[in-house]
Amino acid sequence: MRRITVLRLSHRVGRDERVTTHVGLTARAFGASGIVISGDEDRGVIESLTRVTELWGGPFEVRYVRDWRGYLRSAKAAGAYVVHLTMYGLPLPEVLEELRRVLAEREMVVVVGSSKVPREVYEVADANVSIGNQPHSEVAALAVFLDRLLDGLVFRISFSDAKVRVVPDPRRKVVLRRRETALAEDPSPSDDKLL
Ligand code: SAM
């Protein structure tokens, strides 16, 4: 199956734009299928993640839900397995094999917080999982979680409908652009070539 959706809780306009955007970018680059954002509704974050997906490829679904409880309830009713990333949970290495087995058969929703996470998230989750037991960041936690769960997919992932693609180079920025991609969408100055 291998379908993972990240649920970003408690987004706050004026405080979390950058971190929530980075949660979305990390989810996409490391192999998740989409992000659902809850908390304050923020068109700017949704539009910027959608623009990245249009340019760098997908599919990657980006959407807002007001009612995260309802979202989790219906995801679970449809068979999804909910993982909550929290410093208080079981260390990922202890549950990794079980999570890989689950992912082969069921959709997974990975919940990351922002400010204080309500108690019921711990209760509704099928697994509360820690990436070390020190406080750090939702971006770091998500990156390590997806990297371990998907066994380094970030280094192999490719997006077939991408308009631009990086060619790794030890010294220069090299970006291949699909022929029809407008110059205005060029992501950065580079020694670019046409695909
Ligand atoms: N103070 C908040 C609380 O008490 O729930 C957590 C704030 S933390 C900056 C934001 C999010 O990062 C958390 O909700 C969790 O998803 C993630 N996070 C931070 N440290 C983590 C860790 N060691 N393991 C797993 N997730 C972590």
Image (cartoon, rainbow, N blue to C red):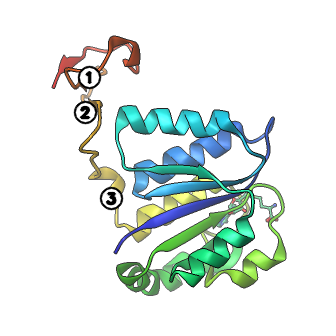
- Say which residue appears at 52% left-offset and 80% top-offset: 78
Q: Position of residue 94 (x, y in %)?
A: 52, 85
Compare marks 1 and 2 and give the one earlier in the sequence. Answer: 2
- Say which residue appears at 63% left-offset and 37% top-offset: 45
On the image, numbered disc 3 is attached to which residue? 153
What is the distance, in whole Å, between disc 1 and disc 2 at their CAs? 7 Å
The N terminus sits in image quarter: bottom left
Residue 168: image tag:
2
- Under mark 1, the amino acid is Val
Compare marks 3 and 2 and give the one earlier in the sequence. Answer: 3
Q: Position of residue 170 (x, y in %)?
A: 26, 28
Q: Secondary structure at mark 1?
A: loop
Instruction: Please indicate whether residue 94 sits to the left or right of residue 104 in the image.
Output: right
Labels 1 and 2 touching (C-beta < 8 A) = yes
Labels 3 and 2 touching (C-beta < 8 A) = no
Instruction: Please indicate whether residue 169 sits to the left or right of residue 98 in the image.
Output: left
- Say which residue appears at 42% left-offset and 61% top-offset: 147
- Say which residue appears at 28% left-offset and 21% top-offset: 181
Q: Nearer the viewer, residue 37 or 112?
A: 37
Residue 124: image tag:
none
Q: Quadrant of ligand 1?
A: bottom right
Kindly tell me whether residue 48 is visible in this rendering.
Answer: yes
Q: Position of residue 97 (x, y in %)?
A: 41, 84
Q: Is residue 131 above or below residue 167?
A: below
What is the distance, in whole Å, between disc 1 and disc 3 at their CAs? 22 Å
Q: Secondary structure at mark 2?
A: loop
- Under mark 3, the amino acid is Leu
On the image, numbered disc 1 is attached to which residue? 174
